[in-house]
Each structure stands twice: as C-alpha cells, then as structure tokens.
Image (cartoon, rainbow, N blue to C red):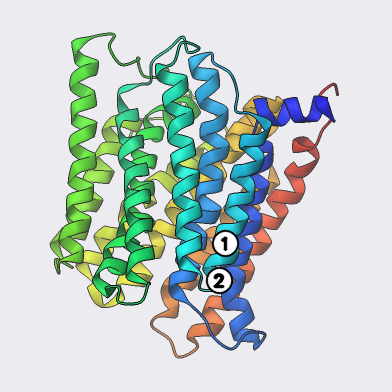
Amino acid sequence: MASRVATWRREPFRVFFPLGTLLAWVGIGHWIAYWAGWVHEYSCLSHGLVQVQGFLLAFALGFLLTAIPRRTGSAPPSAAGVATAAAGLIVSTVAAFTQRLWLAEGVTVAIILGLVAFAVGRFLGTGGTRRPPAAFVLLPMGLACGIAGALLIAWGSSPGGSLRAIGLGRLLVEQGLFFCLVMGAGALVLRLMAGGLPPPDLGTSPAVTRAAMGYGAAGVAVIASLVAEAAGSIHLAPVLRGLVVGGTLVRGAGIAEALDAPGWNRRVARLGAWLVPLGPILAGLVPDFRIAALHVTFLGGFGVLAFAVATHVTAAHLDLVELRDGRPWVVAVLAGAMLVAMVGRITADGVATYFEHLATAGALWIGGTACWLVYLVPAWTRRPEA
C-alpha cells in the first residue's frame, strides 16, 4: 500500500483521470435519467457546473499535479492533498445536483486555491529548479476566473441574489477558466504532443518576457469579452473571444503547424484544439442557437482535448508506445463517439425530439469514454514494481 500511495503521489493522474470520467458520467447521465423518467426535473446550471468543476477540473488536476513537479524538479503533492482534492470534487458534484450551490462553489474555490498554493510553492519555492514557460501566465488568470465565477454563482443563487451575477459567474466558470487553461497549458503540452520542443522558461530572454505580456493580453481580452457578453454584447464579444483564443493557440501552441510525430491520438488532440475557439464564434454569429453552438467547444473542444491529453500523459508516463504513437482502436472509438455525440447535441435544438437527442448523445459519449476507461484502468492500477 505504501508503494501504491507513493506512485499515486508521483503520478496523481492515476487518480484524477478515472475520477473525472465518472463525474462526467454523472453530469451527462442527468439527461438520460430525465428522458427515461428516473428523475422528474433537470438543471442546466447543475449540468454545466458538474462538467466543468467536476470532470474538466479533475482532468486539469491530474495533468497539473503531475506536470508541475516534474517540470520544476520539486516534490510531488502529498497523499493527503491528493485525497482531499479528490474528495472535494465528489462533494462539489453531489452538492451541485442537490441544489446546494453555496457548498458546491465553496468547495470548488477551496480546490482551486489549493492548486494555486501548490503551483506557487513549486515554481517560486526553494525546491524548484525551473521557472514556467511564458504561456503559464494564463494559468492564474484562468484560475482567477474559476474563483470569481464560483463566488458570483454562490452569491447569485442565495436569497436576494442576482440573476446577472449567476450569468457572469457561469461565463467565467464555463468559458473563462478553461479557455485560459487551454491557451496556457496548450503552449507546452500541445507542442510536446506534436513532437516539438518545449517553450523556453520565463526570464531566459527579452523575447520570452514579451511573449508573456502577449499571453497576458490575450487573457485580459478573453475576460473582458466575457464581461461584455454578460452586459449584453451577444454578437461581437463571443466572436472576438473565439478569434483571440484561436489566434493564441495558432501562435503559442502551433496548432497550424505540421505534426512531427505519428499517432492517431495526436491528430485527435489537434482536432480538439481547433474546435475549442469555434464554439463562441458560432454562438456570436447565430445567437439564437448559442447553447448548441457552444457545445462545439464543450464537447468537441474541451472534452476531446481533455481525453486526448490524458491519453498522451498516461502513455508517456507508463511507456504505452502503441497508445501514444500508433493507431489503437480505443482512440478511434473514443473520438468517434465523442464527435457523434457533439453532432447529436448540436442538432437537438432544431428538432422536436430534444430530450431524446440529449439522451442519445449522452449514451454515445458515456459509451465511448467507458471503452477508454476499461482500456486504461489496468495500466493505471498496475503495481509500481511491475
């Protein structure tokens, strides 16, 4: 057991990737349960919060808690820290679906603050040997969106709260948090996945400092567009946001450049990265179908990218060469199911069988990710000495 705990500390993705998948099933299964008559009410707010603050945040924790210590040459997270964060994600999910939003958002804020403390200690503390790349200035901006959005949702849902506060809070949580994280972490992980070299550390040259300022400006533009949309700019603000995110990914993560390494998973990640900025652009151009359009980002962008990065991290750390560089069936099944589910969700708003479309899309998504989970559980739970 001590050996396993040490492994989970060094590679916390073994805990957070499967946990995030299960939490996503809860969030998506909500629509299946409503369509089947197992529950008699639904909540779009709870669904969105669980998908972002449960599923996506769990995957982000798995990646960052693994990558930061390795990049900085510092200590991994403590066993208590990993366990507390995992328990917090579960509590937040349950609280969101039982309409205890003050608890769900409070726990989420605590998790994010814990991640901030962990990162600051590794990058600025005495134990670290490297500084972050320029694009990582976007990470605290994204986490600040997550904290501010959670607090606004908690306040807005309280007695005497404001619906406008909930509206801005949802924008900050559902878009601001992960747009910034994808732009920031993508400049490192997407370049490495493509077979390229990692970006240089902050402070190594004036050019890197200027690049950091550019990334910071992109983050400010994204956040400003969210505030503008909450204030009523439903056409221009989303389009500009998508263009800023897309331009940053092209420039920083190199998503328009040729891949230098083989493998289906790398191509799936590249497709997901292109879909990330497309959602808000379509939402601004066709605001009557705003929610459907944004699922291009949520399902095709964030969702596909999260699983592709998780697949690469697992393959790289556990020496699964075929999974990383080859054409494994599980990658094709996962990507196909998620993309078909995305189409099903998008078209749901234009048909009379709305909830049937949501349930079918959800079942496809859960089926594809279940195949992925079954495929990787043996590797995640493999004995450290094996």
Which one is nearer the viewer's eye here, 286 or 8?
8
Amino acid type, callout 2: Phe
Picture quarter with the N terminus: top right
Describe residue 357's horizontal placement relative to residue 281 as left or right.
right
Residue 187 figure quarter: top left
Which residue was labeled with disc 2?
97
- In the rendering, at what x and y percent does residue 307 appear? 56, 46
Q: Can residue 265 be seen in this view?
A: no
Which residue was labeled with disc 1?
93
Residue drawn at 55 percent across, 44 percent down: 59
Element on which disc 2 rests: helix
Describe residue 323's horizontal placement relative to residue 194 as left or right.
right
Q: In this view, does 18 lie above or below 155?
A: above
Element on which disc 1 rests: helix
Picture quarter with the C terminus: top right
Tag 2 and tag 1, C-beta contact below 8 Å: yes
Which one is nearer the viewer's eye here, 312 or 234?
234
Q: In this view, does 304 lie above or below 287?
A: above
- In the rendering, at what x and y percent does residue 227 appear? 19, 58
CA separation, marks 2 and 1?
A: 7 Å
- In the rendering, at what x and y percent does residue 153 appear? 36, 64
Residue 38 figure quarter: bottom right
